[in-house]
């Protein structure tokens, strides 16, 4: 029995040492600075909604456009419009839709599909 535990402990220590060697020396982690445009659509949408939330607070359209340029889109107002319309047609979260409609309206890209949601944001006439 004692031989079994000794072998087990020696095996665990050797396994840990070999694992540390491979993890730190042979195959270390390489960090690569990826552009935001490489994010999955879910995270791009989440970032866009966060920017729309900030716009709701400060009403700074130029700042919102500058923040969204980091996504690598050529035409930011068109991107916000298409994202907003996709949220509406896919019946996404109503609060997110309201934020996006407000941002899209602030960027001058209000479409007929967005108009019912604009009244809910308090930005309608």
Image (spheres, rainbow, N blue to C red):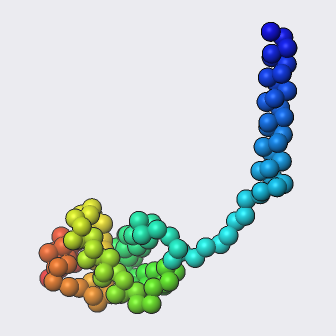
* Whole-percent x, y for residue 56 in the image: 34, 73
> Which residue is found at the position 22% from the left and 65% from the top?
91
In depth, the one of 63 and 96 nearer the eye is 96
Answer with the quarter of the image where residue 59 lies. Answer: bottom left
In depth, the one of 64 and 57 nearer the eye is 64
Answer with the quarter of the image where residue 46 lies. Answer: bottom left
Q: In this view of the protein, can residue 10 be seen by the observer?
A: yes
Image side of residue 34 versus residue 101, left or right:
right
In depth, the one of 46 and 34 nearer the eye is 34
> Which residue is found at the position 18% from the left and 73% from the top?
117
Image side of residue 96 versus residue 40, left or right:
left
* Whole-percent x, y for residue 114 in the image: 20, 78
In the displayed orientation, state which residue is furthest to the top: 1
* Whole-percent x, y for residue 97 in the image: 27, 69
How many numbered dots are placed on residues in this image? 0
Answer with the quarter of the image where residue 119 lies. Answer: bottom left
* Rendered view: 23 above or below 29: above
* Rendered view: 110 above or below 33: below
Picture quarter with the C terminus: bottom left
Image side of residue 116 versus residue 52, left or right:
left
Picture quarter with the N terminus: top right
> Which residue is found at the position 79% from the left and 30% from the top?
12
Q: In this view of the protein, can residue 54 be seen by the observer?
A: no
> Which residue is found at the position 40% from the left and 73% from the top?
48
* Whole-percent x, y for residue 38 in the image: 53, 74
């Amino acid at each position: 029995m004692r031989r079994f535990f000794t072998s087990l402990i020696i095996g665990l220590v050797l396994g840990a040492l070999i694992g540390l060697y491979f993890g730190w020396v042979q195959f270390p982690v390489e960090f690569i600075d990826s552009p935001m445009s490489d994010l999955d659509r879910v995270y791009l949408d989440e970032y866009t909604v966060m920017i729309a939330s900030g716009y709701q607070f400060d009403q700074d359209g130029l700042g919102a456009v500058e923040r969204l340029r980091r996504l690598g889109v050529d035409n930011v107002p068109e991107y916000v419009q298409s994202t907003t319309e996709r949220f509406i047609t896919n019946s996404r979260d109503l609060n997110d839709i309201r934020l996006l409609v407000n941002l899209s309206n602030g960027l001058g890209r209000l479409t007929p599909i967005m108009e019912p949601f604009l009244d809910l944001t308090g930005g309608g006439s």
